[in-house]
Amino acid sequence: MTPLSNEEIARYSRHLILDEVGMEGQTKLKNSSVLCVGTGGLGSPLLLYLAAAGVGRIGIVDFDVVDASNLQRQIIHGTSSVGKAKVLSAKARIEDLNPHVQVDLYEEALSSENALRILGPYDVVVDGTDNFPTRYLVNDACVLLGKPNVYGSIFKFEGQASVFCHGDGPNYRDLYPEPPPPGLVPSCAEGGVLGVLPGIIGTIQATETLKLLLGKGTSLSGRLLLFDALAMSFRELKLRRDPDARPITGLIDYDQFCGVPKSGASKELAPTLSGDFARLGVTEIKAKLDDGWAPFVLDVRGLSESHIVKLAFADALIPHTQVAERLAEIPRDREILVHCKLGGRSSQAATVLAAAGYRVTNMEGGIVAWAQLVDPSLPTY
């Protein structure tokens, strides 16, 4: 193993005086490798602390660019990085923090075709993603490769953390054998998240990663840690392997498994009474409105979101979770145009309305797309 330089000994001195780390442990960290999938809310503190701790090789997978809305929680990025590739922004920050770390960049979407190649060289994989297809993909690849998967997830004021695929411990499918129905669990973009929450969960993931690399302490394998920021409380659930679970023998189409529509799928469906509804982009909707189309426009976001921005021609605000019980407030003699922030919650509401006999069109891309493509005077969030 490559030994520590005098400069590194000075840098890591607070580690070196810990009996549980010492020269031997710090040298292990220098010669270890970690792959972080995602450089968002969870990946930001994770990458910073792993780099500061002296993990010698860090891989980063992400194909997104920095957006101003990221900066409320994604602390590895800054205002000067808006519009820049996240992996490049993260690398610059890591190299400024610790030039002794090798940073590998994978500016591409993780897929069934490249996952085994990308995950293969690393000792530990950390899942910092926010979508179900990638979580299942990371899990299955770690099972096939025999690599620990340090898991974390966040939503609003709550977070989870665990370690999967470690020794004889359970994997992600033992916790969630099947994904939830598409759209049931809103993303942070739609549901929101307390900015400090990913810092807490991401730091827990970093702690578990360092423990695995050092071979110290008791990991979260076999345990699911639950955190509630509003109550400032931690709970723990025991996890066990499912003896009846199907073995993971290969990687699959995870978008299909999770019910995610393929890109380029048809945006227009003929409305019927069976639950189908029309889907139109904002420019098509604007053209129809200009031609005299006069639907009942239903906003299914939360009240707090309507205080940020709203469409002047919206007729009513009913949160998507309340649509089924408030059908009496929605006219049946007009077509219904339903929208939310990005299109996910409105799609759920449209399904409910169409099944109840309404003629419904969902605004694909939501009010954010309207602000970007139709009315740039509106703020986005």
Image (cartoon, rainbow, N blue to C red):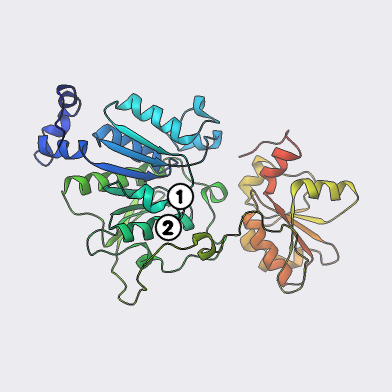
Residue in front for this viewpoint, 65 or 79:
65
- Which residue in the rendered view is the most extreme toward the left? 19
Q: Looking at the rendering, which quadrant does residue 312 occupy?
A: top right
Q: State the SS at label 1.
A: loop
Looking at the image, residue 30 sits to the left or right of residue 349; the answer is left
The Cα atoms of the two marked residues, 2 and 1, are separated by 8 Å
Residue in front for this viewpoint, 157 or 86:
86
Looking at the image, residue 132 sits to the left or right of residue 226; the answer is right
Q: Are marks 2 and 1 in contact (CB under 8 Å)?
A: yes
User: How many C-alpha atoms fall within 10 Å of the one at disc 1: few (<14), some, or many (≥20)?
Assistant: many
Residue in front for this viewpoint, 144 or 27:
144
Regarding residue 299, the answer to whether it shows in the image is: yes
Amino acid type, residue under disc 2 in the picture? Leu
Quadrant where the C terminus is found in the figure: top right
User: How many C-alpha atoms fall within 10 Å of the one at disc 2: few (<14), some, or many (≥20)?
Assistant: many
Residue in front for this viewpoint, 286 or 104:
104
Residue 11 in the image, given as x and y percentages of width and height: 20, 25
Q: State the SS at label 2.
A: helix
Q: Earlier in the sequence, mark 2 or mark 1?
A: 1
Regarding residue 232, the answer to whether it shows in the image is: no
Residue 19 in the image, given as x and y percentages of width and height: 8, 39
Looking at the image, residue 259 sits to the left or right of residue 12; the answer is right
Q: Looking at the rendering, which quadrant does residue 41 occupy?
A: top left
Looking at the image, residue 9 sits to the left or right of residue 330; the answer is left
Q: Which residue is mark 2?
A: 137
Residue 24 in the image, given as x and y percentages of width and height: 10, 38
Residue 207 in the image, given as x and y percentages of width and height: 26, 44
On screen, 90 above or below 156? above
On screen, 332 above or below 339? below
Q: Which residue is mark 1?
A: 110
